[in-house]
Image (spheres, grey):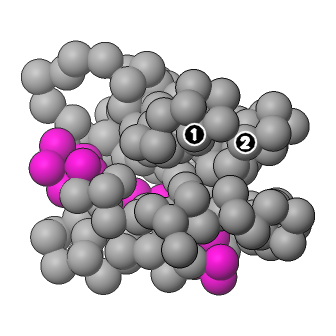
Amino acid sequence: MPQLDDVAFMKRAYLLALKGYNEGGCPIGGVLVDNETGEVLGEGHNMLVQEGNPIIHGEMSAMRAAGRMVTRRNTTIYTTLSPCMMCAGTIAQFKIGRVVVGDTVNSEGNVEFLRTRGIEVVVLNDKDCIELVQKFRAEKPDLWLEDWGGA
């Protein structure tokens, strides 16, 4: 497997999160990448506000954009925030082999859940990812709670 540029792909995910934030939504971006070629297979951001859809988180948006695939074992998903249980379960079910997380400060998410299923998890704790979510949480705490399943 060639070495993927985790910092560059996380920057791409961050720019998607920022796009979501600028649209008034939750700032979580995702990018699904082929480990062999480095090709971006799908990318997107949280669509709770934009589509009124509570299950299209950044990771789900990237997977939806990637579409049908025979296997996802040899892929990496970049997510700006540690995956919620719904996204972690989807990552495990579809056997995505590697996850790179931009922020575990604002949410620990389900890193250990993924690791116990044999998924490689890399935590970057990227300053930009952390600060964007902190800003969003301070500005829109009710929307933050809604995105995580309600109070």
Query: Against 73, is 136 above or below?
Result: below
Whether residue 104 appears in magenta in the rendering, the answer is: yes
Q: Which residue is mark 1?
A: 48
| Residue 64 position in % (x across, y down) | 38, 25
Residue 71 numbered tag: none
Q: Answer with left or right where residue 68 lies relative to residue 87.
A: left
Quadrant holding the N terminus: top left
Determine crowd level at label 1: few under 14, some 14-19, many 20+ residues with C-alpha closer than 10 A: many
| Residue at image point 68% right, 49% down | 26
Q: Say how many tags the image has.
A: 2
Can residue 132 be spotted in the picture?
Answer: yes
| Residue 62 position in % (x across, y down) | 46, 32
Whether residue 107 appears in magenta in the rendering, the answer is: no
Q: Which residue is mark 2?
A: 25
Asked where in the image residue 24 lies, by quadrant, the reply is: top right
Give the residue type at disc 2.
Answer: Gly
SS at circle 2: loop
| Residue range of the region highlighted in magenta in the rendering | 90-106
